[in-house]
Amino acid sequence: MSLELTQRERQVLSIIIQAYVNHASPVGSRFIARNYNLGLSDATIRNVMADLEAAGYISQPHTSAGRVPTDKGYRYYVDLIMMIRGLEEEEKRRIDSDFDFLSSERRDSSDLMLAAAKVLGSISRQLSVVLSPRLSSAVFERIDMVLLSSSRIMTILSIQSLFVRTIVMELDLEVSRQQIEKVVDLLNERLSGLTLSEIRNTIERRLAGSDGDRALLGMVVRSAEDLFDESPVPDRLYIAGTQYILNQPEFDQPQKVRDLVCMIEDKDRMAQLVEEADGLMPLKPSSGRDVSITIGKENNTSTAQDFTVVTTPYFVGDAIGRLGVLGPKRMDYEQVVGLVNYMAHRLSHTLSDTN
């Protein structure tokens, strides 16, 4: 991002963005002169705005005298003007209180991630998303098998003491409880501490020459691609806040509402939006956590090009998930960055405490 704007131009651009965020209407030079003590005449402000428009930082949406920020203007503001601030203690207490209330009854990982999405959506008044970590690089801890019938077992995988996958398997052989127990002991001995991708790629070699029930072990090896595979995206994605974002002025047009609904329903595309932000346009808040912001046409999905996506990682051991908000480009960037950063810290801390 170039540094070609003067201090005066930066001031005016920042005011236009802040006023547009607050009022959702184009900002004119007279409004700036009357409401901000810049020591500049109305005519001087008009000239500054004309220069900003010529450079592509603001635009005139219709014949009114007002201007609105462009994607380029928002990007300049986010990268070079906006001040990253931490949340006030009162804001943190509200998040903590809401999160503790929503997650108080149950403490498994899915409940905590859904609670985080709900809190983030309600406080930001935007659409919030939480994406659980990819499991291929997560560490397998143990497997349990419950015999449901002589030819049907329920397999329970514990991954990093956090994620639990439950899979019911139909067998083409009959097995006893004693056979199941021996195979479970062997699997935990040979596979514990490996990542799921390592298990998928090496399970046949790691179980070769073992003393367990060969028919049952063969079934496990043949089923490894399913047993130790990633959870499907719909099971990894938690979305909340639709009722809040629909109250934004941008959604008084039916087409905008349809675009948003289509995006929410396409969970694979939503997950892609969140994951693609990883490493793009990173900010460095004072805590050191990376916050990524993609604005408008920076989003590869066509239906997301009227939106901004703000995401940050959270951590569970060596596994990395992402959370964030999606909303109109006219959002309070400073507040949103602080919110997603603190919510990620809170979720990481809480998930680690459950282990």
Image: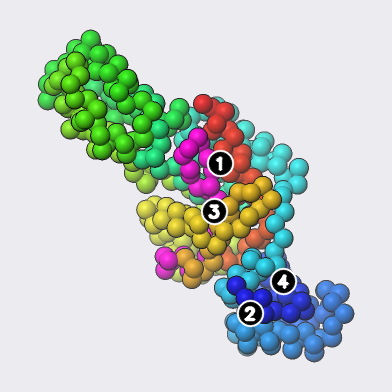
Distance from label 3 to label 2 (Cα)? 25 Å
Instruction: Give coordinates of residue 93: x percent, y percent.
Output: 72, 39
Identify the residue under disc 1.
Answer: 116
Residue 58 visible somewhere in the drawing: yes
Relative to 340, say whether 40 is above or below.
below
Q: What residue type is disc 1 on?
A: Ala
Identify the residue under disc 3.
Answer: 311
Distance from label 3 to label 1 (Cα)? 13 Å
Say which mark, if any, is on residue 14.
4
Crowding near the residue tagged with mark 3, few <14, some 14–19, many ≥20 C-alpha atoms within 10 Å? many
Along the polypeptide, which appears first: circle 3 or circle 2? 2
Distance from label 1 to label 2 (Cα)? 35 Å
Residue displayed at 61% across by 41% down = 345
Instruction: Give coordinates of residue 160: x percent, y percent.
Output: 44, 30
- Render colour scheme: rainbow
Relative to 45, say whether 226 is above or below.
above
